Structure formats: C-alpha cells, structure tokens
Image (cartoon, rainbow, N blue to C red):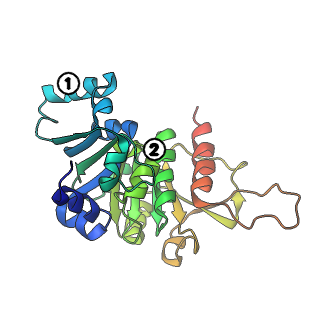
C-alpha cells in the first residue's frame, strides 16, 4: 500500500506552485523514467514488482548504484499497474511512476549558444506542444532551448509525458526573451522566425547555427520579439482546397523548420 502522505505529495506536484516549492517533478512510464534517471536525481520510485525485476531496470539501477546516484531513492512496489492509480496522472497508469529532483536553471549566456542551433519559445502555453517540441529538438540534435518567462513549465506532468525522455538530452533556460535576442543580435547571431509574409523556407539558404523563434499557439510571435527577428521564413501551403487550413500547429511547424535547417548540413 502507498501511504496517504505519499499520495498527497505526488498529487500536489500537478501544481507548479508545489513543484517549485518542493523542487520535484513527476515522470511516468518505463522508458521515460529510465531515460530521465540518466540526468535527474530520483527521489521516489513507485513501480509494479514485475517492472522492477526487468533486465532493463536492473541494469540501470545497478549502474547508478555504483555511483551512489540511486541508493538514496525511496522505492515502493505494488502488484499491478492499477495499484499505481493513486500516484498516476494518466487515465491508464503504466508500470512505474518516479519523483525526480528539479535542477536549478542556469542563467543563459550568448557565449554558450553562439555556435549552436537553438530554439527560442515565445509564450508557448500548451504543455503537449511543449513536450513534443522538446522531443523534436532532441531528434534533430538541438541541445538548447531558451524559453520566455511566460512559457509553460517544462516540468508540468503533461510536458514531461509528451517529451518521452527527451528532457534528459536537452538543456533549458528561462529568460527575458527580448533582452536575450537583443544580446544575440549584438553578437551577430542570426535570428529566424516563421511568418505568413516570410520567404519560402524551402528555397532560402539556411546556416548551421542561429536561433529559431517559435511563437504562441494562438497569437504567434509577440511584437517585442518580432522586431528582433532578422530572417522571416514561411512554410508554403500546397493545398489545392479553397478551404485550406490557415496555419500549422506550432509543434508541426517546429518539425518542418528544424528538418529544413538540419538537412542543409554538409
């Protein structure tokens, strides 16, 4: 049985206020948890007896135990995944739920980003989109994401779930985005964004490095950020339907843009 105290603790982590106060976040699912254990310190692990006995879990935990990275975690085993319902945020619980320690966000510096392709998120609010974009960044080898101060929390359970372990491979920064982009301009870093009046992304010459700005789902890129963008790109619509869609979902647009930048690499 999982104690009421532990259930209450996990339930509180659905709220950003308590995630910040306690410095903890929740991840669910075997692959997600085992990927995140590489980077984040595990404080508590709730799992079925079967999952804890799998070769994958045994291997990871044996490796971590050698470095004392997992030995302090509290572990709680139950018979079936249904027994994890009290500590799960999913409709159908998976075999493992883990509580991780949140890292301290480091201040972003232009020097650290100058030779990278970087994503900048301007006010994204949908946690599923945010998690998907993190996964896309990982797929295309983009290791750094700068978030505006009003972007959703990357440690929201829905974001963590959608990212599917990619949080372990990407570094995050929260910053005053206009100030950050101003510094980037002064350092001669190219800044890109997608607009309806931009140049066709498929015919533009794209560099290996730079900053790609992705805007809010409903309002797009804010005026304060837009004026700092040097390169306005457009993903053309090839539909022959007069009732064609007006825009792409921001996560889908992110995948198209990242793919175009990466396929130009020599």
Rendered residue at 28%/40% (across/down): 47
User: For this rendering, which residue is in front, 146 or 55?
Assistant: 55
Q: Residues within 10 Å of mark 1 (few under 14, many from 20)?
A: some
Q: Residue at x 34, y 37 (%)?
A: 35
Badge 2: residue crowd in 10 Å (few <14, some 14–19, many ≥20): many
Residue 130 image position (x, y, % from top left): 47, 58
Q: Quadrant of residue 196?
A: bottom right
Residue 64 location (% of width, % of height): 19, 30
Instruction: Examine the rendering and report whether any part of residue 106 can be seen.
Output: no
Disc 1 designates what residue?
Answer: 62
Question: Mark 1 or mark 2, which is nearer the start of the sequence?
Answer: 1
Residue 184 visible in the shown view? yes
Please identify the residue farthest to the bottom as the structure is shown.
223
Q: Residue at x 21, y 25 (%)?
A: 63
Frontmost residue, 260 versus 37: 37
228 or 132, nearer to the observer: 132
Direction from residue 56 to residue 204 in the image, left or right: right
Q: Nearer the viewer, residue 193 or 57?
A: 57
Q: CA distance from mark 2 to mark 1?
A: 30 Å
**Residue 189 drawn at (x, y percent):** 46, 55
Q: Secondary structure at mark 1?
A: helix
- For label 2, the residue is 142
Q: Quadrant of residue 197?
A: bottom right
Is residue 161 found left or right of 250 in the rendered image?
left
Which x, y percent locates residue 240?
89, 58
- Compared across the picture, whether 2 is left or right of 90 comes to left
Q: Nearer the viewer, mark 2 or mark 1?
A: 1
The C terminus appears in which quarter of the rendering? top right
> Which label sits on residue 124?
none
In terms of image quadrants, where is residue 78?
top left
């Amino acid at each position: 049985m999982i104690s009421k105290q532990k259930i209450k603790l996990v339930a509180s982590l659905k709220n950003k206020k308590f995630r910040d106060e306690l410095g903890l976040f929740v991840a669910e699912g075997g692959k997600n948890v085992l990927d995140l254990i590489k980077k984040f310190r595990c404080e508590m692990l709730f799992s079925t007896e079967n999952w804890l006995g799998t070769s994958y879990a045994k291997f990871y935990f044996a490796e971590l135990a050698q470095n004392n990275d997992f030995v302090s975690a509290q572990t709680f085993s139950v018979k079936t995944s249904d027994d994890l319902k009290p500590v799960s945020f999913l409709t159908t619980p998976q075999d493992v739920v883990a509580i991780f320690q949140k890292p301290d966000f480091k201040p972003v510096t232009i020097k650290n980003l100058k030779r990278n392709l970087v994503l900048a998120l301007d006010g994204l609010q949908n946690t599923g989109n945010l998690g998907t974009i993190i996964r896309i960044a990982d797929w295309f080898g983009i290791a750094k994401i700068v978030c505006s101060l009003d972007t959703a929390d990357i440690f929201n359970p829905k974001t963590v779930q959608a990212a599917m372990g990619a949080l372990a491979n990407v570094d995050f920064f929260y910053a005053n985005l206009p100030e950050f982009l101003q510094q980037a301009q002064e350092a001669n870093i190219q800044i890109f964004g997608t607009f309806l009046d931009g140049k066709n992304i498929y015919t533009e010459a794209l560099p290996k490095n730079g900053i790609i700005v992705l805007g809010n789902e409903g309002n797009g890129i804010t005026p304060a950020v837009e004026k700092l963008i040097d390169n306005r790109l457009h993903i053309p619509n090839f539909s022959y339907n007069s009732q064609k869609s007006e825009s792409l979902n921001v996560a889908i647009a992110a995948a198209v843009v990242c793919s175009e930048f990466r396929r130009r690499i020599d």
